[in-house]
Image (cartoon, rainbow, N blue to C red):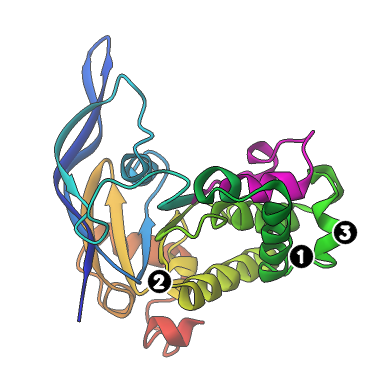
Amino acid sequence: MTKVLCSIRDLSVAYPTPTGAQHALKSVSLDIIAGEKLAIIGESGSGKSTLSLALTGLLARQAMVDGVMSWPGLGSAPRAGRDIGIVFQDPGSSLNPVLTIGDQVGEGARRHLGLGRKAARDKAIELLSRVRIPQPEKAAGAYPHQFSGGQQQRIAIAAAIAAGPAVLIADEATSALDTIVQAEIAALLEDLVTNGDMTLIFVTHDIGLAASLADRIAVFRTAELVECGDARSVVNAPRADYTRQLLATHIDLHSPRLVGAADVR
């Protein structure tokens, strides 16, 4: 039975400018289903990252917000770090260079689950193993600069899921990585969500990557939601001209391989 985790109705977000209010989101209505993998795609400035910030309650103070966002699947507004974990584009900027990996990954467990230092370190080692960091016990005592970009992103994912969130938002989490590492991180996210009873919101500009990962795809352009549907339908029979343009830049629309998101994998 489908369970609505988050219900968004006529959500608008605008920012004041010298020439008047500038919309970052305009009258967006969308349901997020518990346990799904939802890809939010669009070009820079389309509103996709603004939506992720709205979901986490991290919009800038000057943001002017209208509309309704409710969380029937949680019963109350989510707490960033506890109910929602966030992975950003650049792991180098989200990891503290002077703290050990174990301290950073275990911080969420200490803060939100009340674990002591030793229990949090044990939890960090378990999470590092889960995201496939080699020699996790040794890695827990190391520092971010000792890891590659792909490994740093795995560590950032481990930190984001430390408190067992219901939702994991990956905001352009693969765009700074090369193609092979992108695919590895996407596969890791899929595995974590499938086996961890989480909902994944995958924010990206890459519709090909979205098609390989998502159950549904929501397409944004210039602050508006232009199309939303299951990945198979959006990839094989897009309704919006803009979606067709995005697909044309990534994939041959007439390729017989594109029979569904699962087959793109």
Name which of mark 1 and mark 2 comes first in the sequence: 1
Residue drawn 38% across the image and 34% down it = 58
Looking at the image, residue 87 sits to the left or right of residue 51; the answer is right
Question: Circle 1 is placed at which residue position?
Answer: 133
Tell me where residue 183 sits by quadrant.
bottom right
Residue 138's disc number: 3
Q: Position of residue 132 (x, y in %)?
A: 72, 70
Q: Position of residue 252 (x, y in %)?
A: 44, 76
Vertical order, 110 against 187 (above or below): above
Q: Amino acid at mark 3?
A: Lys
Name which of mark 3 and mark 1 comes first in the sequence: 1
Q: Position of residue 62 (x, y in %)?
A: 30, 19
Vertical order, 69 against 123 (above or below): above
Residue drawn 39% across the image and 43% down it = 49
Q: Amino acid at mark 1?
A: Ile
Q: Amino acid at mark 2?
A: Ala
Q: Secondary structure at mark 1?
A: loop
Name which of mark 3 and mark 2 comes first in the sequence: 3
Q: Secondary structure at mark 2?
A: loop
Residue stretch in magenta = 86-108
Q: Residue furthest top?
A: 18
Spatial separation of the CA atoms under disc 3 and disc 1: 10 Å
Tell me where residue 191 sits by quadrant.
bottom right
CB atoms of marks 3 and 2 within 8 Å:
no
Looking at the image, residue 139 sits to the left or right of residue 154; the answer is right
Foreground tag (3 vs 1): 3
Question: Circle 2 is placed at which residue position?
Answer: 214
Mark 1 Cα-neighbour bin, 10 Å: few <14, some 14–19, many ≥20: many
Q: Secondary structure at mark 3?
A: helix
CB atoms of marks 3 and 1 within 8 Å:
no
Tell me if residue 112 can be seen: yes
